[in-house]
Amino acid sequence: MENKNGKLFIITGPSGVGKGTILKKFFESNHNIIYSISETTRKPRPGEVHGVNYFFVEKEDFEKSIKNDEFLEWAKYSDNYYGTKKNFVLKALSQGADVLLEIETQGAKKIMEKFPDCITIFFTPPNLDELEKRLRGRKTEDEEAIQKRLHQVKQELTLAPLYKYSIENDKIEDALEKLQAVYNKEKDIQILKQDGK
Ligand code: 5GP
């Protein structure tokens, strides 16, 4: 798929790795890149807001959108659907805006196939024990969901080498600085290309 204007950034990383916290800070100081709000059939966690964190939808509606080919990508993750709506992202890119998708590995793979020029970033935890601690610490999943997510995490980590950048989230500030450096660098490449230099 051709993308002449804006750049597409894909952020992936296991559940509990801290992507949400890093991205929240990232968007506080980067206003020229748009966060694509996904649809999900997962129930909102305390504090999550419809239209901010996700669009929380019913399973039937999500499946209808799949049938109508409305998703750029979608995946089933831990018994719930998650997906990126096509219209919003394609329109933003065609208008020259950079767009960031925060998605899991199956969806990221589909996007990499459709947009070979996308910039892919994988967040890794310092180690699995730390990740488990963070997952349990947020107290939003029951034991079964935690076990499912931990199993998924181990599989996801094997895919990190497919990504252009890998950032370890040991300390939030360091990870944020690295993400900013990647964004600044990739933005500059875009400007150079547009200038024809
Ligand atoms: P959570 O339930 O913790 O918010 O998200 C679970 C996983 O789904 C995370 O790895 C998150 O990045 C991913 N995710 C969120 N939105 C999307 C989406 O639109 N598509 C895909 N494929 N994954 C998503």
Image (cartoon, rainbow, N blue to C red):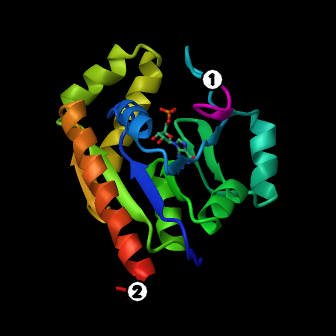
Q: Which mark is residue 26?
A: none
Q: Is residue 167 left or right of residue 99?
A: left
Specify whether tag 1 is near ligand 1 (CB below 8 Å). no
Q: Is residue 63 magenta?
A: no
Residue depicted at x 76% and y 33%: 58
Q: Label 2 sits on what residue type?
A: Gly
Count of numbered marks: 2
Judging depth in this view, the residue of 87 and 44 nearest the camera is 87
Which x, y percent locates residue 69? 76, 61
Please say if 125 is above or below 74: above
Which residue in the structure is indicated by mark 2?
A: 196
Q: If you read the primary sequence from the N terminus, does the residue marked by circle 1 or circle 2 appear first?
A: 1
Look at the image and give the residue range highlighted in magenta.
50-55
Residue depicted at x 44% and y 67%: 118
Judged from the image, the secondary structure of the residue bearing numbered disc 2 is loop
Which residue in the structure is indicated by mark 1?
A: 49
Q: Is residue 51 magenta?
A: yes
Residue depicted at x 58% and y 47%: 36
Say few, some or many: other residues with alpha carbon within 10 Å of mark 2 (under 14 / 14 to 19 / 20 or more).
few
Among the 4 quarters of the image, the one containing residue 70: bottom right
Which x, y percent locates residue 123? 30, 45
Residue depicted at x 62% and y 23%: 49
